[in-house]
Image (cartoon, rainbow, N blue to C red):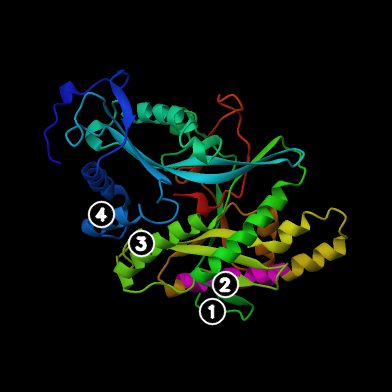
Amino acid sequence: MGFLIDHNALPDSNSPDLHLSHPTPDECIEIWRNTSTSWRDSLTLPVYLLESLYLTTVPLAKDKGMTTWILVDKNAVPDKRPILCSCESFRKRSLTSDADGNIEDNMVHGIASVFCPPEYRRRGYAARHMKEMAKALRSWQPEHGKCVGSILYSDIGKTYYANLGWHPNSTNSHVVLQPSKGPKSTLAEDITEGDLLKLSVRDEQLVRKAMAMPAKVNRRLTIVPDLDHMLWHIAKEDFATVHLFQKISRAKGAIAGPPGNQVWAVWTHRYYDHPDAKSHNNVLYILRLVMEGETVGKSFAAEKEEQHAVRHGKQSSYLKAVLQAAQAQAAEWKLDHVELWDPTPTVRAMIAQTEIEHSLVEREEDSIASGLWYDENGGVSSAPLWINNEHFAWL
């Protein structure tokens, strides 16, 4: 908005005059202009501003699913106040279960786009902002259920947010595959946007079945991989590909195998750089991988080993077909590699069996899934076992 700032008049980060508020429409534009230097990816500033506004209207964000938060002086006038720090929160459906498999429906707030303008850094504002967020989100939107925690994905390592209460998940790993223009397997079929609702419903049923199984952990948690998550990522992808290529991809994933033993993946394209730039690092992210037989198979502890071997042998071929479809999609759409987050030990073993060239990466600096968890009394609790820490939950 272009007003001059007297830095000597800025409040101390511990000042009682600082509080969380919500921005006006003009302040949202100011926030997006500031964040564009970090997050506009391959888009120009005008197009990034359009994308930012558009992404407030899509599933997961619309209907107050997304909230924008700002740290400001409570005595300052809206549209004339310095925005010392900002972020967004997204309401996410979640499930927890105990060692006996008793499931509870609840919610988690996902924090995204934490940003402190350069001129306000090293003053403690970001830390104050996050401390206020920890308090605010505990009771935010209670009409949608009990909040059991908040999550974020740190791009500044594991220490900073851990010191503020958001401790890194025990694993932050992903498998990397290279693009491939090889012939598409006849076992795999494209998943289109119209297929996603039915698959998401089936996926949630499988997740609930798995969470209801007794386990040797006191508390498990999963973010529900629902349709809204997939559609948010797809909306962002489609916006970018229209501006880059004047078209969108029909394939939003791939599926292989017969019902009851299917494997499917839903994916998204992310263009951090223009594909025609001299250097680029663009990614096809597998948002969610479902192995129907794997999940169901865990429910039958007495199943004979040879039956497991047959099931896994078939699923290995289906998994290979799905991953090859992802590699082909990456090649077709000028993406530099494929990432599959949080592969289970079974998935990792099956990928090895497919003989598809791959590598395993443990993230240490970027996209570090981190959580702050609440106990029954609203205090801070120890971390649950986070199931399905996949890319769909990242925002």
Residue displayed at 66% across by 53% down: 207
Disc 4 crowd rating (10 Å Cα; few below 14, some 14-19, many 20+) is many
Instruction: Tell me which corner region of the image, top left, top right, bottom left or bottom right, holds residue 214.
Output: top right
Residue type highlighted by circle 1 = Gly
Residue displayed at 54% across by 35% down: 147
Residue type highlighted by circle 3 = His
Q: Which element carries disc 3, helix, strand or loop?
A: loop
Measured in 3D between alpha carbons, the distance from the residue under mark 3 to the one under mark 1, in whole angstroms, is: 22 Å
Residue annotated with mark 3:
280
- Residue 9 appears in view: yes
Q: Which element carries disc 1, helix, strand or loop?
A: loop
Residue annotated with mark 4:
49
Viewer-side residue, 254 vs 175: 254
Q: Which element carries disc 2, helix, strand or loop?
A: helix
Instruction: Say if 161 sits above or below 207 in the image.
Output: above
Residue annotated with mark 2:
324
Residue 373 is situated, as x and y percent measured from the top left of the image, at 56, 32
Residue 182 bears which disc, if any? 1
Nearer the observer: mark 1 or 2; the answer is: 2
Instruction: Say if 343 sits above or below 357 in the image.
Output: above
Magenta range is 315-330
Q: Which circle's residue, 4 or 2, is located before the other in the chain? A: 4
Nearer the observer: mark 1 or 4; the answer is: 4
Cβ atoms under marks 3 and 1 closer than 8 Å: no
Cβ atoms under marks 1 and 4 closer than 8 Å: no
